């Protein structure tokens, strides 16, 4: 019951001001978002990769309101790529981007987001890595998939995300699997209406399994984004049944969540990528993590009381 209320709060400017200004918020935020600057996140990248993990880096930010912010988002990724170049880690470290941060919701936003993301994808390719387009709320997805298709003409490695809770996703998965895409499947983190999305957890899990099967049996590279032990075990079984080697798909989890499981899967020989978010505009990302697990909210509230 708490989840939808927190997701609603994640879009509220008033709540953003209250939560962001709370003096005790920072240590709790750091569990999920381990830095605010490139300088702070690079040592984290080095630590994760030393442990045999791969990384996808997300500069936090979304729902911008001015064109200048979209240029700033592009430049933040270009600055990051400059630093990654020095590490020479290639595709061990890729990037995840939210097109709303690149201006997608502004007037002429589809073209603006494409114009902003293209140089990032180009710069990533130049250092031997790639970019994955995150999935945001359902109203943004036609534009996201069109941008993904456009980018793939020159950069076929560009990935995208699909969300199991949406009714449309099985059809999207079939199309993407046939075209040989890199596709991350996740349950879905936004508040979506019953007209477009399953509301029941068991229904979402069943859809997730159907979609994984499509991806595993298809031509593309499946990226299994979940912390759910049952779905991870099913993914391993579907991978085996589809005759995939361990490096022909990968697992992905969020930084700060089930970290021991990251290491276990990597030790089993799986590719395990840790989605690591950093930056100052952490509110939306942080609130979605609270919504996914109400215990996180209790931890957050307790830290305010005991301070
Ligand atoms: P759940 O059933 O939610 O969780 C399974 C178990 O994992 C829980 O019992 C708990 O032990 C643990 N767990 C899960 N979440 C948390 C948490 N926040 N804090 C502590 N423990 C937790 N969503 C999108 O809509 N678009 C995206 O582009 C997107 N990208 C993602 C990328 C990655 C790599 C991952 C892992 C998730 C992404 N998500 C994205 C979020 C996703 O949609 C889910 O909201 C999130 O992964 C929780 O679902 P779950 O599969 O982990 O299963």
Image: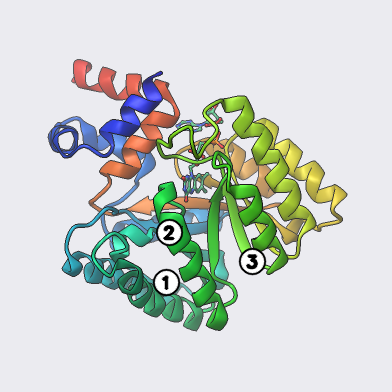
Q: What colour scheme governs how the chains and residues are painted in the rendered image of this protein? A: rainbow
143 over 209 or under it: above or below = below
Q: Residue at x 48, y 80 (%)?
A: 127
Tags 1 and 2 touching, CB below 8 Å: yes
For the residue pair 157 and 42, the one nearer the viewer reads as: 157
Q: Earlier in the sequence, mark 3 or mark 1?
A: 1
Query: Are there few (<14), some (14-19), or many (20+) residues within 10 Å of tag 2?
Result: many
Image quadrant in which you'd find residue 39: bottom left
Q: Residue at x 74, y 37 (%)?
A: 233
- Mark-to-mark CA distance, 3 and 2: 20 Å
Q: Residue at x 45, y 62 (%)?
A: 144
* Dot 3: element: loop
Residue 163 is situated, as x and y percent measured from the top left of the image, at 54, 46
Residue highlighted by disc 3: 181
Tags 3 and 2 touching, CB below 8 Å: no
Query: Are there few (<14), some (14-19), or many (20+) residues within 10 Å of tag 3?
Result: many
Q: Where residue 84 is drawn, which disc sits there?
A: 1
- Mark-to-mark CA distance, 3 and 1: 24 Å
For the residue pair 106 and 250, the one nearer the viewer reads as: 106
Residue 306 seen in the figure? yes
For the residue pair 92 and 188, the one nearer the viewer reads as: 188
* Dot 1: element: helix
Residue 169 is situated, as x and y percent measured from the top left of the image, at 60, 48
Image quadrant in which you'd find residue 155: bottom right
Query: Are there few (<14), some (14-19), or many (20+) residues within 10 Å of tag 1?
Result: many
Quadrant into which the N terminus falls: top left
Quadrant into which the C terminus falls: top left
Image quadrant in which you'd find residue 121: bottom left
Residue highlighted by disc 2: 57
């Amino acid at each position: 019951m708490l989840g939808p209320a927190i997701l609603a709060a994640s879009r509220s400017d008033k709540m953003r001001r209250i939560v962001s200004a709370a003096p005790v918020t920072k240590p709790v935020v750091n569990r999920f978002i381990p830095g605010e600057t490139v300088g702070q996140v690079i040592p984290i990248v080095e630590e994760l990769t030393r442990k045999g993990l791969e990384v996808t880096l997300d500069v936090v930010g979304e729902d911008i309101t001015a064109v200048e912010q979209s240029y700033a988002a592009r430049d933040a990724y270009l600055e990051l790529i400059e630093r990654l170049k020095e590490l020479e880690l290639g595709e061990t470290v890729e990037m995840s981007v939210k097109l709303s941060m690149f201006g997608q919701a502004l007037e002429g936003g589809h073209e603006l987001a494409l114009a902003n993301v293209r140089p990032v994808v180009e710069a990533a390719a130049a250092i031997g890595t790639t970019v994955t387009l995150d999935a945001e709320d359902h109203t943004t997805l036609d534009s996201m998939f069109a941008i993904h298709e456009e980018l793939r003409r020159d950069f076929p490695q560009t990935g995208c995300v699909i969300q199991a809770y949406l009714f449309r996703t099985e059809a999207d998965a079939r199309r993407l699997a046939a075209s040989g895409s890199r596709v991350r499947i996740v349950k879905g983190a936004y508040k979506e209406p019953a007209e477009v999305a399953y509301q029941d957890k068991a229904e979402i899990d069943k859809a997730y399994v159907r979609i994984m099967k499509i991806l595993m049996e298809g031509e593309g590279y499946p990226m299994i984004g979940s912390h759910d032990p049952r779905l991870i075990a099913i993914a391993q079984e579907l991978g085996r049944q589809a005759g995939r080697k361990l490096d022909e798909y990968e697992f992905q989890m969020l930084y700060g969540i089930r970290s021991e499981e990251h290491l276990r899967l990597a030790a089993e020989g799986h590719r395990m990528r840790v989605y690591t978010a950093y930056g100052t505009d952490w509110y939306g990302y942080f609130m979605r993590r609270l919504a996914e697990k109400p215990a996180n909210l209790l931890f957050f509230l307790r830290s305010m009381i005991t301070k």
